[in-house]
Image (cartoon, grey):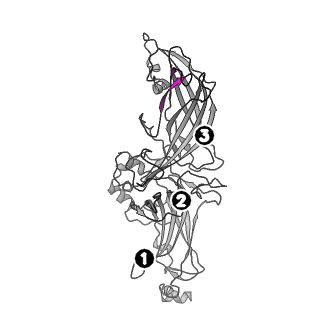
Amino acid sequence: MAASLLTVGPRAADVLYPFASPQIKIELARETSNVTRAYTTGDLIEGTVTITANHLISFDQIDIQLEGSQTVFVEHGAMPGGTGATQTFLRLRQPIEESCYPMPRVIEPGHSYQFPFTFVVPQRLLPHICSHSKSNVHIQRSHTLLLPSLGDPVLCRDGTSALDDMSPDMTRVTYHIRAEVVQKPVVGPAKSLKLAKKKIRIVPAVEEEPPLTVPDCDPIYRMRREKDVRRGTLRPRQGRLVAAASQPKPLQLSSSPSKHSESVSTAATIHLRFDPVGNEEPPSLGTVWSKLRVATYYSVHPWGDYPTISGLSAVDMSGRGVYQELLPLSTMCVASAQWTKHGMDPLVRRDSFHSTSSAESITGPSASFSGDVYYTASLVVPVSLPTSRAFVPTFHSCLVSRIYILELCVSYHTPNMNLLTPTVTLKVPIQLTSGQSGIVSMTSSEDITQEEVDAEFFSPRSVAPQLVDSAVAPPEYSDYTSPSLSARPQEVRCS
């Protein structure tokens, strides 16, 4: 039967089996069943698409792509329905030469047809992906950096269980290998006979950004605080306590996390200054608590600037919001910390080394300081990420952003303060980076012209899929999808 049909023509199979569809199997090279491999910038994503069928099926094209998309869905609170937006920011297509297809183009039962694919994880997205209006000149560069996978518990595994990446239900950043068998009728549009997708996890290499410049009235961060120190609730001031901290070195994530990998850690330094009233002694220090606040910003409209918590809520009718989780990191006793006494002699000129010391330049005198004596102390706080959660690098995209805030709380003791233990709290920005330093190109996307994009990515070329060293398929991108009313995606939140 198969031989006679092939002799008559491949379209004869469509008459006998009009509703037949092939089977598609997508296999990735070097993939294990227990741990999902995480790909990073520059990695090769290699695998094979296998096509089989139970009946004779004619086709015209095999389409293999690597796609990346981000989705946001925001419910309207008490009102039914919601608003959603989806942006496909990455589409790489694998070219298939004519010689790789069977002749004629018919899938015969009992035969397997294999089509290898090779993709390279890019460093950046093309400039026109972020084409919306902007109020910050730096947002274009941030929005054209590759996004990490976010919001899928199946991909965030340590070998035994799914890990929570602390993303809300309403946000997703997904990558998948997409394979489709296409049939092109003589009349009418092309028809998809079968479509299969396989999710993959991407953790791009992210380099350290310059430290943030935080104003005193910033709604998110608090790098410096002053507080009156009293011997009792109704007693006069003992002095003024100043606490300050600068942005610590980033937490360097591994692009291939595993359960037995070393913990990710850094250190933050809290600088303290006490300006006494008269001859008062500084208070005794007690405990330092450190916590990590994980904030995920989302919007169905593209962000024109870096998001802030000002004016946002968990459910916002404007389609914007922020989801936060607070992770306790450590508790450290600092009762043994010693204060250092300083005297200010107006007749003695201080050299440049003392005048630019980090502790004094960060804290500075309090608003009420008018004496000649003050005290300083420094507390080094280790910061380590818990291994029970999945972390992604700090990133900003058109619809979704992820930032991290390090909260440092110091308690101190004064005489006659037995009921309540006074504390002072700082909120410091901290970055999470990924990959090895220097792997990310520092070339700005604004330097790439549209002519260069067309010449590099969209010029005709013929590349055999089985040749690993050959050029990779050109990336193709879809435009931003405007928000629309839709049903909530059936997706499971990390738990």
Q: Earlier in the sequence, mark 1 or mark 3?
A: 1
Q: Secondary structure at mark 1?
A: loop
Q: Is residue 221 magenta?
A: yes
What is the x, y in percent for residue 321?
45, 51
Residue at which label 1 appears: 190
Which one is nearer the viewer's eye here, 247 or 9? 247
Q: Secondary structure at mark 3?
A: strand
Q: Is residue 269 above or below residue 182?
A: above
The mark lying in front, picked from 3 and 2, is: 3
What is the x, y in percent for residue 204?
50, 51
Q: Earlier in the sequence, mark 2 or mark 1?
A: 2
Tell me how far mark 1 sits from mark 3, CA to CA: 55 Å
Q: Residues within 10 Å of mark 1 (few under 14, many from 20)?
A: few
Q: Quadrant of residue 127?
A: bottom left
Residue at which label 3 appears: 329
Q: Amino acid at mark 2?
A: Ile
Which one is nearer the viewer's eye here, 110 or 328? 328
Q: Amino acid at mark 1?
A: Ala
Looking at the image, the residue that sits furthest to the top is 347
What is the x, y in percent for residue 120?
49, 57
The mark lying in front, picked from 1 and 3, is: 3
Residue at the spot 59% in from the left edge and 54% down from the top edge: 156
Q: Which mark is residue 18?
A: none
Residue at the spot 50% in from the left edge and 60% down from the top edge: 119
Residue at which label 2 appears: 45
